[in-house]
Image (cartoon, rainbow, N blue to C red):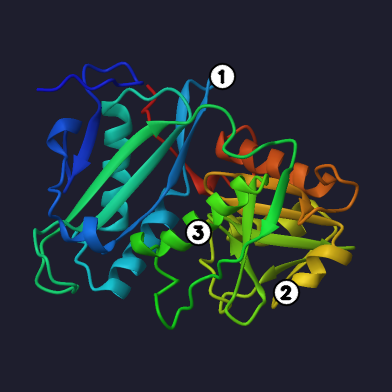
Amino acid sequence: MTNVHNPFGAPCPQVAVEGEIVPADEARISVHANALSYGTGTFEGIRAFWNAEHEQLYLFEGAAHYQRLHRSARILGLPLRFSVDELVAMTHDLLRANDVRTDAYVRPLLLLSGEVLPVRMHDIDSRLSIAVTPVVGDYANPSGLRCMVSTWRRASDASTPIRAKVIGSYVGPALAKTEAVRAGYDEALMLTGDGFVAEATTANIMVRFGKTWSTPIGTDDILAGITRQQLLELIPEITTAKVDERRVHRSELYYAADEVLLCGTASIVSSVVDIDGRRIGSGRPGEQALRLRHDLQAIARRQTTQHQEWTTAVYEKE
């Protein structure tokens, strides 16, 4: 067996495949797998947060992510034989098997693994796997992001089911991200086909105008993220602002925004300080965005009693 480096300290990193925890070397797929050629599958990204004081690892919104995986599977017509509760328990088992005692990222993948060449979604074997990797540092610059509006547009739900996290649908965002970085920016913002603001490459966007936050409506070709839903609840709870879901014009990003933030599982909450060379607000991370980031991280680590229903403890305590 090939020696695989495991950042968690076990002899070999463990991966869950169809409910069984196996060494990573046994979790490979063929180069002829249908999903490798065509992106035929769906995935999730879930965070787990370590609380050193509690000596506990907390899975953050595991059930919500697996509910979305089930919805994505239904849209694509993929079988998923495990319930949400079984998937959460399986993830807990995997984190314990790898003795994870640091912040981590969990990646469930449900894809067409069969060695079938034609482009289709039917009569091909599928496979569910769950892997885990450590998270070191911040996914996005905590000092604020410089963004550009990409020349690449967000794919329409008429061509790709955007409400599902389809593996193949991330080629467009990947092109937009590279375009932005090569132009000297941190991140790209993508518009809908008819020119309204959609989302960033892997995060939703929210824009504050005075005492109101606005975020693109779900029918504007966005993946309505789980962190976005959390903020829809948290903003009125911890600030004096309200939130509107509506169509957002590109020009609103430039001339009217007091704050802009991106939110997602990986980035949590990140402030945008510049878009296309135009300063947002004071040009520094906004006060409300910083408060939301702080509070959401505290919830994720159970450093507060607020929204404890969003986390589940991985290690059993005597």
Residue 117: mark: none
Give the class, few, some or many, for how many residues have Cα within 10 Å of label 2's Cα (few <14, many ≥20).
many
The correct choice, above or below, for 26 with respect to 88 in the image is: above
In the rendered image, the quadrant that contains the C terminus is top left
Q: Residue at x 12, y 48 (%)?
A: 30
Q: Nearer the viewer, mark 3 or mark 2?
A: 3
Q: Quadrant of residue 152?
A: bottom right
- Badges 3 and 2: C-beta atoms under 8 Å apart? no
Query: Left or right: where does residue 71 sit relative to residue 129?
Result: right
- Badges 2 and 1: C-beta atoms under 8 Å apart? no
| Residue tagged 2 | 248
Q: Nearer the viewer, mark 1 or mark 3?
A: 3
Pinpoint residue 68: horizontal percent, then vertical percent.
40, 62
Q: Residue at x 66, y 47 (%)?
A: 269
Give the class, few, some or many, for how many residues have Cα within 10 Å of label 3's Cα (few <14, many ≥20).
many
Pinpoint residue 82: horizontal percent, then vertical percent.
22, 56
Q: Quadrant of residue 151?
A: bottom right
Q: Amino acid at mark 1?
A: Glu
Pinpoint residue 277: horizontal percent, then vertical percent.
80, 53
Residue 303 visible at all: yes
| Residue tagged 1 | 53
Q: CA distance from mark 3 to mark 2?
A: 19 Å
Q: Amino acid at mark 2?
A: Val
- As helix, strand or loop, the secondary structure at mark 1 comes to loop
Q: Nearer the viewer, residue 229 or 282?
A: 282
| Residue tagged 3 | 173
Query: Left or right: where does residue 278 sit relative to residue 47?
Result: right
Give the class, few, some or many, for how many residues have Cα within 10 Å of label 1's Cα (few <14, many ≥20).
few
First in sequence, mark 3 or 2: give its number.
Answer: 3
Q: Amino acid at mark 3?
A: Pro
Pinpoint residue 94: horizontal percent, then vertical percent.
28, 34
The correct choice, above or below, for 127 with respect to 76 in the image is: above
